[in-house]
Image: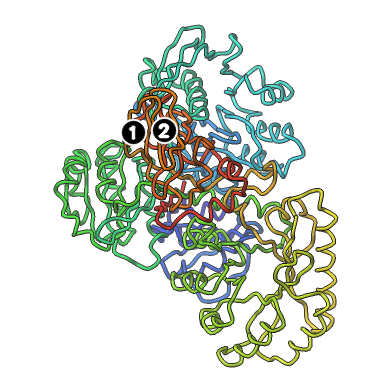
Amino acid sequence: MKLTDISALLGGAIPTENREIELLLTDSRSLTFPQNTLFFALVTPRGDGHVYIPELYADGVRAFVVSKPIEGDYPDAVFIQVSDTLQALQSVGRARREELSMPILAITGSNGKTTTKELLYQLLAPSLSVGKSPRSYNSQVGVPLSLWGLETTQALGIIEAGISQPGEMSRLEAIIRPTYGAITNIGEAHQQHFERLEQKVREKLLLFQNCRTLFAPYDDPLIRQQIEAMGLAPKTLYWSRTWSGATLYIQNQEYHPSGVKITGMLAGQRIALELPFLDQGTIDDALLSLLIASQIAPQAIATLEAFSRLKPITMRLEVLEGKEQTLLINDSYNSDYDSLRTALDFMKRRNPEGRPTAIVLSDMEDSSHDPHDLYSRVAQLLGQYPIGRLYLVGSQIVEQSGLFPKVNGCFPDWASLDKGLPFANLSGHIVLLKGSNSSQFSRVIEHWKVQTHQTILNINLSRLAHNYHTLRSKLPAGMGTICMIKANGYGAGAYEVARTLERAGTDYLAVAVVDEGRQLREQGIRSPILVMNPELSAFRQLIWNGLEPEIFSKEMLKAFSQAADIYGDHILPIHLKWNTGMNRLGLMPYDVGEVVDLLHHSKSIRVESIFTHLAAADDPSEDDFTRAQLAKLDDIQLRLEAGLGYSVRKHALNTAGAIRFPQYQSDYVRLGIGLYGITPLAQDEMGLEPIATLTTQILQIQELAPGETVGYSRKGKLERHSRIGIIPVGYADGLPRLLGNGNISFRLPDGTLVPTIGNICMDTLMLDLTDAPSAVAGTEVTLFGDGLPISRLADACHTIPYEILSRLSSRIARHYYSE
């Protein structure tokens, strides 16, 4: 759109320069084409986009939508001032929608929106020009950005729509104005903002009040009842496993090791199809996709063979340690232009130290564009990033290699790349490998990455950010957060966890000892860091690294005051811990007067906050004790402030306290195990998601006869002919010996649970695979993860999940990825 048209739309002054706007930007870190970018300075509880205007101007951006007067000298810049920049962004999204004549399918639901969208794209794109939301762009910000990205030449748009509180869906409906609608399911996500599930379902269904056709699951009674109550039933088509009158009726699902065979009726015609999935959620999303495609593009699925070729929707960008000091970014999410932009943005953010970069780029599965036009756009996009080396893989992109200013190598396929590229050329680089998921692609990744211990802890950083924002949304407006990353980020890896939480907007990070904080500073973490157990001998390092100490005794207060006088160059903040009933570390309430006297005699320190540790915040039977602790801290605050003559901040609530006592007034809440998707309560009331998955592989399988024994002390006695698998994880990796002798079962890829047998050894343990005939050497084994909570292991050991996660050995490789 022309900048003059956008300004007129938003009620701004008409600029003299009428530049063409191609990109809308809300995150300064994602800048690519500055001259054709319009930046919206969004103001949120976590940040103010106006502060990035000087940086963006220096990078070449000349068009801004702002809600505040801008001071300073910005020659040639255009500022469109509005009352609300988010509403302005949505207005531009609505205007873009009016320009689009193609039908739009809108998808909502608690889970499966992105999976359904991506499965539909796989099915329809070979024969239909389809535009879609990038990644999970389904919010009040993401929807207008998604609409802006659609092209007028496309035949169908697929847009996700997500909500977190009442009132949001009506705004999205007015922006999207969907032709078709689909709802996947309903669950507990964002339930904290709704009184009942029924209210949330009604809010989601508002998206479809004006659409032509709605696709929905009949077997979810809550969705079906609200569709009928809202008068949407006459235009709704259902899929079902229980009602033969549904448009898509599933009669049978027959599972096999690599997928499921499905038979049923579609619009009165008998169907049979194969799906290469085993998890029920993806199967349900594929069936909804079948129903949708059969109605809006039946020619695309005429034979149903395409369903057997569907690829899993991993939505992950995986970071791996590579050979020759390389860092590998593995991206097989999608092989198209939009996902390339996402991957380049990820690489840019992952490289704050400015390491040299390389990209290995394969043919793109995008039949809706002429190859010359497509790769011209790709070359232009790559030109916006500092890329040192570029390698092309595949016949189509190699044929267009002349479009790229500099290509360091061309290869017909991934196998040729693996054999023909001297890997030393990539030494020290961050390497993005961008291609569709295939066996050749996977072999290159396996060959290039450092071969480490086969036992891997996979950390989903997107879920970590989700858990932070979920917990943050429970807090009163203005309350800050202190995120606990002690014990190496509860075993997940302190740096990656700290980096993710820093970007999510936490006010403080908290570690246990000074060395943990010093290492984070050396790795570039700049957020305030609270040290919970500082040693007197480390005060100098603490001060020099800009860390803030917890002070829990009068002797420590005196010692730190002296150290601040010697090593500090300004007044240093401290955090006083008070013992209100935990009876562990802490100043006593009767120490207030003496503490005030000591502080009056020091000119180098000042109290930033006071806090206490709740002994039983997760136990309803101890609520009276918890309230008494909170009352004691309130009294300490009043007496301390009266003596000091200035205000101090206060915090007491941990994750359990934040969930159970959200009404308690304080300045911060300390978020711990909940960030990692482990709830300290009997039932997760927050929609937290586990961030960690622990997997390993079967090393060898032994065929043993009845009467033989397995392992040390001959504890594993066999009563039948047995297949025994050995996996490379033991108590030296942090796995408790209590899990041996059948006390726990682990999961194979086909969903089979196989029990331990015999005692767990230092480096290995044994599994009884007798009832899992498909298992072979190299088969993956999941110890905990999605659908297999870590609490199972904790319960079997009569302990808590904290202990299991935090004691995992450093020799277990940590792999990080984002969705």
Q: Which mark is residue 130?
A: 2
Image quarter for residue 239? top right
Residue 690: where, in percent of width, then height? 55, 45
Determine whether label 2 and label 1 are within 8 Å by CB.
yes
Q: Indicate the secondary structure of the residue bearing disc 1.
A: loop
Is residue 271 visible in the rendered image? The answer is yes
Q: Residue at 41%, 33% (x, y): give it.
A: 130
* In-image side of 614 versus 789 (left or right): right
Residue type at mark 2 is Val
Residue 630: where, in percent of width, then height? 81, 63
Q: Residues within 10 Å of mark 1 (few under 14, many from 20)?
A: some
Q: Is residue 285 above or below residue 805?
A: above
Q: Is residue 225 above or below residue 93?
A: above
Residue 689: where, in percent of width, then height? 58, 44
33 or 347, nearer to the observer:
347
Residue 466: where, in percent of width, then height? 57, 49
* In-image side of 62 versus 798 (left or right): left
Q: Residues within 10 Å of mark 2 (few under 14, many from 20)?
A: many
* In-image side of 196 versus 574 (left or right): right
* In-image side of 498 versus 684 (left or right): left
Q: Is residue 378 above or below residue 748?
A: below
Q: Which mark is residue 245?
A: none
513 or 567, nearer to the observer:
513
Q: Earlier in the sequence, mark 2 or mark 1?
A: 2
Q: Indicate the secondary structure of the residue bearing disc 2.
A: strand
Residue type at mark 1 is Ser
Instruction: Check disc 1 and report the residue beneath it.
Output: 368
Query: From mark 2 to mark 1, how far is it between C-alphas?
Result: 8 Å
